[in-house]
Amino acid sequence: MNNNDDIQASPPRLVDVEGLARALEQFAAERDWARFHSPKNLVMALTGEVGELSELFQWATEESSREAARDARLAEPLRDELADVLLYLVRLASVLGVDLNDAAVRKLQKNAAKYPVDAAFGNSKKYTEL
């Protein structure tokens, strides 16, 4: 049996956001915000937060980008923006009824097939060019 058979037989729990999803649902309900949380609106909010995260790295060098979480000026804003992205992503998945663990496991399986180690090792080319 290969590793892909193991994953298909018993998918590992790689992502567990159920508690977070419940907390976000409660947070929205307490404020009567659920009515605003359409998938379209959540995607737009998520995109905005990814933009704010990107802005922290704008004009950074490769080296300084690797050190961003240890930079006193960037550490807290970086954590905040990463959290915002996570919160909107989890809320979006919850509203759509998407199991993020299942989605992640399936995507890893697809990527493993598209990027076999022998062809992709040390190579940044897209799978269509391998």
Image (spheres, rainbow, N blue to C red):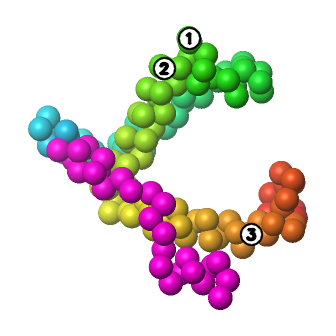
Whether residue 83 is visible here, answered yes or no, is yes
Residue at image position (42%, 46%) is 89
Q: Nearer the viewer, residue 3 or 33?
A: 3
User: What kind of element bears circle 3?
Assistant: helix
The spot of residue 16 in percent (x, y) is 39, 56
From the image, tell me which residue sits under label 1: 73
Question: Dots 1 and 3: beta carbons under 8 Å?
Answer: no
1 lies above or below 130:
below
The spot of residue 9 in percent (x, y) is 50, 84
Q: Which mark is residue 102?
A: none
Whether residue 55 is visible here, answered yes or no, is no
Q: How far, Cα to Cα, is label 1 from label 2? A: 8 Å
From the image, tell me which residue sits under label 2: 77
Residue at image position (42%, 34%) is 83
Q: Nearer the viewer, residue 91 or 38?
A: 91
The amino acid at mark 2 is Pro
128 lies above or below 51:
below
From the image, tell me which residue sits under label 3: 114
Judged left or right of residue 28, residue 125 is right
Q: Residues within 10 Å of mark 1 (few under 14, many from 20)?
A: few
Choose the circle earlier in sequence order: 1 or 3: 1
Question: Dots 1 and 2: beta carbons under 8 Å?
Answer: yes
Q: Is residue 3 magenta?
A: yes
User: What kind of element bears circle 1?
Assistant: loop
**Magenta range:** 1-26
The amino acid at mark 1 is Arg
Residue at image position (80%, 57%) is 126
The amino acid at mark 3 is Lys
Judged left or right of residue 94, residue 32 is left
